[in-house]
Image: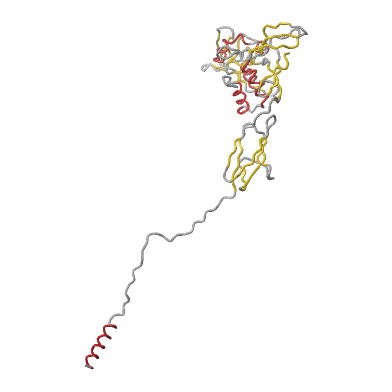
């Protein structure tokens, strides 16, 4: 019995000590990386832009920095002001919490004068089919050779009014001069034989001349002398409405509002003309004032009766003075 227990104990000992290896532990495998905390940076400054077709001054009233387009400001409330002469001031508080663009169109004050302009015949030039033609006494008085004629046109300057100068004249081509024949009657100094810039390809010493008023043209030695009439390619889109034409002059020619308005009137209307003048009592005179030009429906651009102070020997094409009030022409004088 004792032997039996001894044998069992020895067997248990050898079985327990027979292996020293550890049992492997399976690891949990996953494709997802460990989560990381994302940090979102909050903006504290935003851009402010104010767009206005007529405001001349824009301010932010509750801060010291001056406004400039796209100004960068801290998030918050801002008091915006937009002003222009003759317009109602715009003021408004805004909450700036994102990039913001404001569009402000100021309303015009009623019965505010914007200044004076003159409607009168343009002197020394005629605007015909998109070209400014020189129209002066010299065009029928002074002859010069071809080279002098080119230099003369290059240096020529003629004022449209007190502020606008045409200074890009050139010697016209023969085609320009042929086209001018159809408008010969519109010229104050019409007719005569004129130099063109067209040179004979085979005989470089010869240039073409064109006779205005007659169907005649030919070649003439450049050393010879004849008359000169210069032309400018300054082109204005007169098919636009008066309002759009004024905007065109301001935007593309950089003219002031009054210069743009005056030029638009003089070019689009043509010269002013007086018709049907009748003398009234108290030294008054009733007359019909109309424009030289008319629209596609044969209606004159300007056609109104006026009662004015009587004047002896009034010109048929007078100097008319307008005051512009709320973008409209108000007659003030007819001289």
Left or right of 335 on screen, residue 102: left
Instruction: Name above or below for residue 151 compared with residue 89.
Output: above
Q: Report x, y in % for residue 110.
A: 68, 26
| Nearer-the-camera pick, 103 or 9 | 9
* In this view, 169 is above or below 44: above
Q: Describe residue 71's horizontal placement relative to residue 320 as left or right.
A: left
Outermost residue toward the bottom? Answer: 2
Which of the pair 248/127 is nearer the observer? 248
Tell me the residue at 61%/26% (across/down).
247
Image coordinates for residue 239, horizontal then vertical, percent? 56, 19
Residue at the right extreme?
A: 282
Quadrant containing the C terminus is top right
Residue 161 spot, x, y in % from top left: 69, 21
| Residue visible at 57% across and 6% down in the picture | 214
Q: Quadrant of residue 222?
A: top right
> Along the horizontal axis of the image, is 54 left or right of 297?
right
Q: Position of residue 33 (x, y in %)?
A: 41, 60
Q: Quadrant of residue 277?
A: top right
Vertical comparison of 164 with 139: above or below: below
Residue 64: image quadrant is top right
């Amino acid at each position: 019995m004792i032997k039996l227990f001894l044998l069992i104990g020895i067997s248990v000992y050898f079985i327990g000590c027979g292996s020293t290896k550890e049992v492997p532990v399976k690891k949990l495998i996953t494709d997802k990386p460990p989560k990381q905390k994302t940090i979102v940076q909050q903006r504290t400054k935003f851009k402010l832009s104010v767009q206005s077709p007529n405001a001349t001054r824009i301010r932010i009233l509750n801060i010291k920095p001056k406004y400039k387009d796209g100004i960068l400001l801290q998030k918050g409330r801002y008091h915006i002001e937009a002003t222009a002469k003759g317009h109602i001031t715009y003021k408004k508080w805004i909450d700036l919490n994102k990039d913001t663009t404001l569009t402000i169109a100021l309303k015009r004050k009623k019965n505010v004068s914007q200044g004076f302009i003159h409607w009168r015949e343009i002197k020394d030039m005629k605007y015909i089919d998109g070209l400014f033609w020189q129209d002066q006494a010299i065009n029928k008085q002074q002859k010069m050779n071809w080279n002098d004629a080119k230099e003369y046109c290059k240096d020529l300057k003629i004022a449209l009014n007190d502020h606008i100068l045409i200074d890009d004249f050139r010697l016209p081509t023969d085609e320009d001069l042929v086209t001018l024949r159809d408008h010969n009657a519109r010229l104050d100094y019409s007719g005569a034989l004129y130099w063109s810039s067209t040179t004979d390809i085979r005989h470089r010493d010869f240039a073409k001349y064109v006779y205005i008023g007659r169907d005649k043209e030919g070649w003439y030695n450049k050393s010879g002398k004849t008359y000169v009439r210069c032309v400018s390619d300054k082109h204005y889109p007169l098919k636009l409405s008066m309002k759009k034409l004024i905007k065109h002059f301001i935007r593309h020619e950089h003219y002031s509002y009054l210069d743009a308005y005056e030029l638009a009137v003089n070019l689009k209307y043509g010269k002013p003309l007086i018709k049907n003048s009748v003398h009234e009592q108290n030294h008054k005179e009733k007359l019909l004032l109309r424009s030289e030009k008319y629209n596609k429906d044969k209606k004159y651009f300007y056609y109104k009766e006026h009662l004015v102070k009587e004047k002896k020997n009034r010109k048929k094409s007078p100097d008319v003075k307008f005051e512009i009030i709320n973008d409209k022409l108000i007659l003030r004088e007819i001289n």
